[in-house]
Amino acid sequence: MPLQLIFTSAPRGLVAGRSGYCTVARHRSIPDRLAQILESLGTPHQNPEGATFTFRIIEASNTNWFVLSRFVARGLDYSQRDNRLAHHLIFTAEEAAVLPPPSAIAFRWNGWLTEWTKEPTWLTEDPRPLILDNAPPLRPASAWREFSGTGAKAAWLVNEVGPATLCLTQPPEDKILLRLLAESASLLGQSAWYATFTTQVIVTKSDGFNWAVGAVTGRPEINLSQAHQLPTPTGELAVRAATGNSAPIPARTTSEKNSSAVRRTKSNQSKLPWNIIIAFFSLGILAIMVALVIGQFSSRSKNNAPPNNPTAPAINTTQSSDIYRSNIAIQGVASFLDSERYVDAGKLWLESVNHSPTFAERYREQYLTRITKNYAEKTASQLLQRLTLPNLNQNTVSEIGEDAATAVRIGTELNIPVDANWKKLVNVNDQIQIISQLDIRPVILINGRWQTTDLGKSAPSSAEFKLSNAGAEKILKFIELTKVTSELTVSARVRLLPLTSFHKRDNLTPYLNAEIRRGGQSYWIETSGTAGTAPIVVGIGPKKKSLELNFTDGTATSLQEQNRILEIVLPDGSHQCIALIADWKKIKPLNLGTWALDVERDTGVVQAATWAENALKAFQPETGTVGLYPTGHEFPDRDLASLRATRSLLETDLLRNEYKESTRISNQESIKSRKQFFAQGDYINAGRPWSLIIVSPKGDAGATLIEFQ
């Protein structure tokens, strides 16, 4: 096991007298100078989500130390401030020599800490080897192949002398990014541990790092979001990355062949004909006999001369390597097709065509036709089937979204025919992208209007959103759950966002520090804004029920007809949103598609699919409830609104619509089609499009929150 050092905010550090940000755990064998250097790095990661990974080579105590670090920011510390933690793994050169590249360890090791809740500790030495999760081989570069279309692009990050110095922008998620770095580093062999990197150069800076994720002025840049469009590198490293093979065995050199010929020549020349000896002792023989002897000598000499062997043709290593890669690739394509993994088959086909000039013409008729024939239909069906699996969560849906985008991209490169099946696949991808980017959080829906004060463009202004008694009561219940008292305040983080559609993800707008407190009979949520920021004040009490914004300029007037959503994050990471709605017409219902619905086989009840349940349950109207209804449902509806639409409700709606629409020729076909779906037991299509609607206490229909089309 490597040496470790953990640095975070704590009331007491490992060294007596230290508190705040300090070392809380480390091995005793770490040199003090190295510990000081690691502490000086601090905790540069500030985002409450994700992590920053770095790999450095640090010289301390006349030794080079190989340090892999992970920085995170999670929750609040003991003083109710943002808490951050640095976890360092420290390797010697001897340890590094037998381990995979550091970026591989970063995503394969499960021992990373996100918080420290123990007492300060001196860690004990552990002789056991580092335990890593199983992972595919780093060569061939399969992650680069899936991410960029070809494994050869792993060679972008290296050259013949070692790691290149460059920056990578628009990266994928950490796990994929680290896998890409590991596959590139593996091309360097033992030098893989000299490829230093940072996954967030904006917080760590670029000094000392070969590979910097983020823009760096003066460095060559690779935009990873355009990896598929950028040209593929060439050369031995690119071939090695794509195929996993070492350099091909070279053909025998000309000098080697010449040395063999020389050996044969010497051997033949040592065999002197016996006729020559006779000739010297036959001077008195008749001239004709001499002539015959000379003729025989001449003939024998010619026969015993070294043979004029033609030079053997050079071995065409390019051709043999091409054939080898083709054979391996076509086996993979055939295997993927047999298991109906059309996207994987398409990826491998495209990569193989790129690296093997004869591959396409040799196998096009036999395999490419099979890929393109069923690609769109099977892939769309498989993606939709994955969305109906039980126990789906948002992370799983995000993975399906990535796979859907990849399927469309690969299909486009394969020139899949643009028919009904292809259009369906594209539509499925569009919907899954919307679904995968949702940020589902509980939201209280409050109607009202902004009251603003304006003393001029450059003068301070304020905006107040009056809360109804019912709306204030909903917020008060949330505040009470935080267990705030007159003696105990609760820290939080808040931000105010534009509201155009619910469950919309926002990764850019920063949070403001705030506190939830109680004074007398009133409760407050108030930001502790820094200079130049607009404080946000929510007051709930006998004399005040409102949200108030204060600005240093005349910004308040722009809020009069605008919708906003206040997002509150508590120390335990839980979220609560408060939607302040001045104009419902400006809010576009979220379309989740009909695959967000499911049918109970036994009862015929139409309800949300497992993965979409939270999106429907998240809404808390200030009055009334929300319900799921088929198209054309008649309001007012005195029955209690429900997220489960029964078979009888749908049947009643169809009968009412048939009677109501009997005189309208244009809708007769629609009613007929819906009745056919109902008779077949396809209740989702029989009620399509479905809607999630706010229903008032009197049964009147309110705003539509979600559509299922």
Image (tube, rainbow, N blue to C red):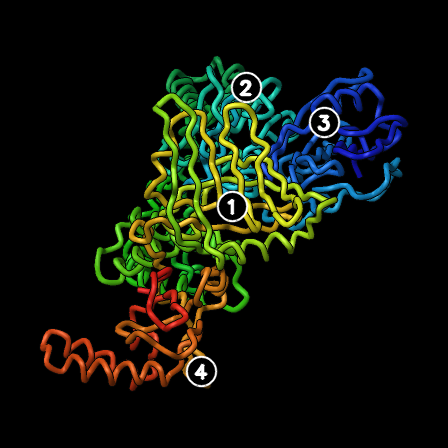
Q: Please, what secondary structure does the residue beneath circle 3 have?
A: strand
Q: Does label 1 or label 2 sit earlier along the sequence?
A: 2
Mark 2: amino acid = Ile
Mark 3: amino acid = Phe
Q: Nearer the viewer, residue 354 or 92?
A: 92
Q: Identify residue for label 3.
A: 66
Residue 367 drawn at (x, y percent): 33, 57
**Quarter of image, res 202:** top right
Mark identifier at residue 200: none
Mark 4: amino acid = Arg
Kindly report the distance in space between the C-alpha atoms of the residues bearing marks 3 and 2: 79 Å
Q: Please, what secondary structure does the residue beneath circle 2 have?
A: helix
Q: Does label 1 or label 3 sit earlier along the sequence?
A: 3
Residue 507 drawn at (x, y percent): 48, 40
Kindly report the distance in space between the C-alpha atoms of the residues bearing marks 4 and 2: 110 Å
Kindly report the distance in space between the C-alpha atoms of the residues bearing marks 1 and 4: 38 Å
Residue occupying image coordinates x 38% and y 68%: 695
Q: Does label 4 or label 2 sit earlier along the sequence?
A: 2
Q: Please, what secondary structure does the residue beneath circle 4 have?
A: loop
Q: Identify residue for label 2.
A: 277
Mark identifier at residue 567: 1
Crowding at label 4, few (<14), some or many (≥20) Cα neighbours within 10 Å?
few
Residue occupying image coordinates x 72% and y 27%: 66
Q: Identify residue for label 4.
A: 601
As drawn, the residue found furthest toward the front would be 543
Crowding at label 1, few (<14), some or many (≥20) Cα neighbours within 10 Å?
some
Check whether the beta carbons of the residues at disc 4 and disc 3 lie within 8 A of each other. no
Q: Does label 1 or label 4 sit earlier along the sequence?
A: 1
One can see residue 309 in this view: no
